[in-house]
Amino acid sequence: MAMAIDATISDLYGPRGRAVVNSYRRKYTDRSVEKLATEWADSTVKMEQFYHSFPESDRALVSYERLTTNPAATVRALCEQLEMPFEDGMLEYWRHEHHLLYGNAGTRSLIQKYRGQATGYADHAFYAETGLDIQPDFRWRQELDAQQLAEFERVAGERNRPYAFDEDMADLGEPESA
């Protein structure tokens, strides 16, 4: 017997290409920025196709910058869009039981830190220094040099442009070209 699932798909967007490539650079030290940027751009196309395969009414976009710099307002707006009540505990997801199959190191590190578990990540020091709160990770701005940024721009800049963050944007609308 098939069961109907009432679901909304969400996509966290932002100038993520450079951040993802920088994160992968730390993880896959043998790969070039060109290769990592190509992989990111290709996977982004697939993700966008999947996201847009859902009816517009079942899609929710969330800005990474907005979520990490103003989590309460962003989660409240998302809850409103999803027509569900906001609860303060949503901002402290690490306090709740999770069955993580996949996720980035930042997300997993907060859960592990709250539980008193070691993270074991290569950039453990970065996560050890952060508190138990949602905050942005803009390390790419310091860690990618001018040549690497130019290489990223050449390979994936066009793909990354729709995700530019507009600080004046007040709603959870979609990026211009996504």
Image (cartoon, rainbow, N blue to C red):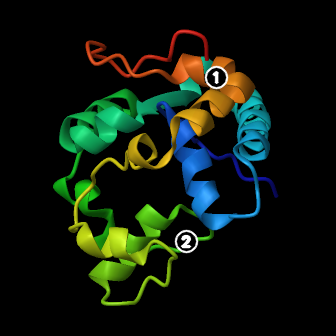
Q: Residues within 10 Å of mark 1 (few under 14, many from 20)?
A: some
Give the residue drawn at x 19%, y 42%: 72
Q: Residue at x 38, y 80 (%)?
A: 112
Q: Label 2 to label 1, Cα distance in Å?
A: 31 Å
Q: Residue at x 35, y 70 (%)?
A: 127
Image quadrant holding the C terminus, namely top right
Question: In the image, 150: left or right of 120?
Answer: right
Vertical placement of residue 171 versus 33, above or below: above
In this rendering, the answer to whether 90 lies above or below 14 is below
- The residue to which callout 2 is attached is 100
Q: Position of residue 77 (x, y in %)?
A: 28, 30
Foreground residue among 142 and 100: 142
Helix, strand or loop at disc 1? helix
Could you say where residue 39 lies in the image, as x and y percent from the top left? 78, 43
Q: Which disc number belongs to residue 157?
A: 1
- Quadrant, the N terminus: bottom right
In the image: residue 20, left or right of residue 107: right
Residues under numbered marks 2 and 1 in contact, where contact means CB atoms less than 8 Å apart: no
Q: Nearer the viewer, residue 147 or 68?
A: 147
Q: Quadrant of residue 30?
A: bottom right
Q: Earlier in the sequence, mark 2 or mark 1?
A: 2
- Residue plotted at (40% across, 33% down): 82
